[in-house]
Amino acid sequence: MGKRTSYPPGTFCWVDLSTTNPAAAKAFYGDLFGWQAVDMPVGDDQTYTMLRLDGDDVAGLSALPPDQREQGIPPYWFNHVSVEDAAAIAARSRDLGGTVVVDAFDVLDAGRMAIIRDPVGAVFGAWQPANHIGASVVNDPGSFAWNELDAHDPAPAIPFYRDLFGWEIDPQEEDGKVRYYSITNGGRANGGMMPLPESVGPVPPHWLPYFTVASTDDAVVKIGELGGQVLAGPMDVGSGRIAVAQDPQGAAFAVFQGEVDE
């Protein structure tokens, strides 16, 4: 079982969804992954939904903020990295060529967070835990297992993340060309970076969460039945079988069937 009570600094610890239709998103992911949605008021008539699997926190969900809707930002999954000091990480990210979108702030009594854009344009959260460590289970079916930076050229982000979190980032070559970068944090697998081919079009750089499933092929069928769309796959990779999809509101995510860490 992938139970967690803490995360070493530099580890992906949480994912949450900003969506234009929270009710529809709850139904879609509840049917797909078996999640139970628990709404939590967070002030000013706002609600944050905790998504749980058999009582364990696995992800979160909230309405896309009005200012982001006005900017034309589509629904998206947001990935968080556990840190000891969100303010210090934000300051360091500036020195390394990143941009602090939102400086460190308190999230009730759950923790403290800064929102950062890396040098290639992908945005992530630096999460300093207090009462909420992040997901209490990972890797098991229905929970996230992998986080991947997708960009046409992720290479400029490599020194940024190496210096910011101490990640080891190793290229994987095929026919003399880098096809993937694997990320380890403290000797443990912690995601990857995918150079996107030009054929996919002008996709903005982003961190993509992968959720474990018992069967990628069955999940692909279910995604279609529930009104989602499969963007790529199913396809076999070295560690298993994956597919990239988007939910009915347009947020991208991936599913994974294969071997995972405990």
Image (cartoon, rainbow, N blue to C red):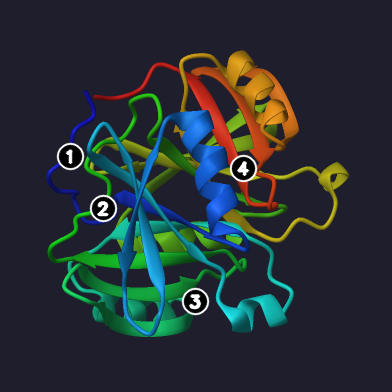
Amino acid type, label 1: Arg
Mark 2 vs 3: CB contact within 8 A: no
The residue pinned by badge 1 equals 4
When the figure is inspected, residue 72 is found, relative to residue 259, above or below; the finding is: below
Which residue is at a point 70% across and 52% down the rendered structure image? 250
Residue 190, given in percent of the width and then of the height, sits at 36, 41
The numbered mark, 1 or 4, whose residue comes first in the sequence reads: 1
Question: In the rendering, which numbered label is found on residue 250?
Answer: none
Give the distance between the C-alpha atoms of the residues marked 2 and 3, in whole angstroms: 24 Å
Q: Earlier in the sequence, mark 4 or mark 3?
A: 3
Kindly identify which numbered label has been placed on residue 134: 2
Dot 1 alpha-carbon crowd within 10 angstroms: few under 14, some 14 to 19, many 20 or more = some
Circle 4 sits on which residue?
A: 194
Question: Which residue is disc 3 drawn over?
Answer: 98
Crowding at mark 2 (Cα within 10 Å: few <14, some 14-19, many 20+): many
Can the viewer see residue 85 in this picture? yes
Closer to the N terminus: mark 2 or mark 3? 3
